[in-house]
Image: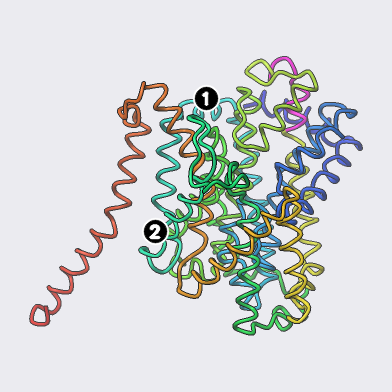
Amino acid sequence: MVEIFGMLLNGFSTALSFENILAAMIGAAVGIIIGAIPGLGSVTGVALLLPLTFSLEPVTGIIMLAGIYYGGMYGGSYSAILINIPGDSPAVTTALDGYAMAKKGKAGKALFAANLSSFIGGTIGIIILTFMGPLLAQIGLAFGPAEIAVLILLALCSVGWLLGDSPRKGIVTTMIGILLATIGVDLVSGSERFTFGSENLLSGLSFIPLVIGMFGFSQILEMISEKIKTDDIGDKVTLKESLLDGQELKSVIPASIRSGVLGNFVGILPGAGATTGSLLSYIFEKRVGKNKKEMGKGAIEGVSASESANNAAAVGSFAPLLSLGIPGSGTSAVLLGGLMMWGLQPGPLLFQQNPEFVWGLISSMYVGNLITVIAAILIIPFLMKIIRIPTSIMIPVITVICFVGAYSFQNSMFDVWIMIATGIIAFYLKSHDYPIAPLLLSFVLTPRLEQAARQALNLSDGSLGIFASSPISITLLLLIVLFIMSPLVMKLFKKKQAVKEDPIAS
């Protein structure tokens, strides 16, 4: 413990140099902007700016890229809360309660809660990384393809039941998302699946046009059909009025701590990522939180759970990256390539051979996280001006954002048509009270489930026994069974209680 503190102090001497603080500030600012733009996200941002850092010192370069990574987690919540278009997939669950709060005139509080929770989750992740990084990496290794597959299956089984007022409708949209995710060429057999002879579908449906259509374009149709006014939402909201009161802090802080710990754990698992961490933490909060009935309808705990978890998961992915050289997410995979370009070999020896690099990076995360939350909070008053724009202007502006975002992803008009089609479908589903979030989340998680399941089956020569061959997978399978059976058990329990209270009526 004393040795860790000593190394951390040495790291701060590196992180607090002028060039590294400047790199952290630039990374945080760029990350917030990139995260807030629908269609980009942290993976794209880090990949685009990676070549620009090769001329910098390795520590300075990785500090800037790390700032872009967790800055993107902050920024993804802005468009989700203000215009109901998640900037990145981890912000899908943020939109569930964040936009609902904005429609109630609480956009400022939603933004402040998102930033505060992001800071708490990020800090929890950094502290855990500081003292338990190598140990957590070893725990992550215990999750092989079979365990990852069962964990994602647990998330898929949960999403349909918990997101939305009707479990039946949630399961329907979850299954639609799973079906959409299977479109394209099977990477193992090379056969086409549900492409209907279209070359544009060979690579499958892209997430960006899908999320823009189902959240953004469907929102335009809803605003037109219901004549929703945006110009009186959050009127004259200042930073002071966005601050959380004592009661709101009592709701935000516990939810952020719970979700930060869970999200960080999920973040260390190879292939799980911030989206899985955000979803599982949101579901967990809906199960154990005090305000579970309001989740999805504008509960501040929902925003906190999602944002704390995705930031903690982003930091958590650095544990297997630095200790084992195993990326825990798409963004950390890009960072791995950057480390190797700098001549650094991530793994157990990195802490011994390049301690100034490792501890400089970890120390910079404390500084960068603080810089990011300050910058994020200070721009809230400017962001609030967005939702005070009259509907007559907001509708064409959001429409342009949707079209440009869908087209610019791959410079393809086909993606624009996909965006329009999915927007119309989402509008129809929402008008009949079918939740959209389970569809998008299952669309994101299904390819990871398929990949992990196939890897596991290849290792076992096709035997299903591998999915129940370890204590971890057996425990997760039992949780899946309990989760599926719990609504039926509760229904029978309530029926028996009704019989006891009024045996004549029954």
Please tell me which of labels 2 and 1 falls first in the chain: 1
- The image quadrant that residue 503 belongs to is bottom left
Residue, disc 1: 138
**Residue projecting furthest to the front:** 197
From the image, which quarter does the C terminus lie in? bottom left
Q: Amino acid at mark 1?
A: Gln
Q: Position of residue 209 (x, y in %)?
A: 65, 55
Query: Where's residue 72, x and y in %?
Result: 72, 49
> Magenta stretch?
351-361
Closer to the camera, 434 or 501? 434
Q: Is residue 207 left or right of residue 281?
A: right
Neighbour tally class for label 2: few under 14, some 14-19, many 20 plus, Cα within 10 Å:
many
- Overall secondary structure of the magenta stretch? helix
Quadrant in which residue 421 is drawn: bottom right
Q: Is residue 242 above or below residue 115?
A: below
Residue at 68% over, 51% down: 119
Q: Secondary structure at mark 2?
A: helix
Q: Count the numbered circles shown.
A: 2
Residue at (91, 38) in percent of width and height: 18
Q: CA distance from mark 2 to mark 1?
A: 35 Å
- Report the mark closest to the observer, 2 or 1: 2
Q: Which residue is mark 2?
A: 171
Q: Secondary structure at mark 1?
A: helix
Dots 2 and 1: beta carbons under 8 Å?
no
Q: Residue at x 41, y 43 (%)?
A: 153
Tell me which residue sits at (71%, 53%) in the image: 39
Residue 467 included in the magenta stretch of the image: no
Three-letter residue code for mark 2: Ile
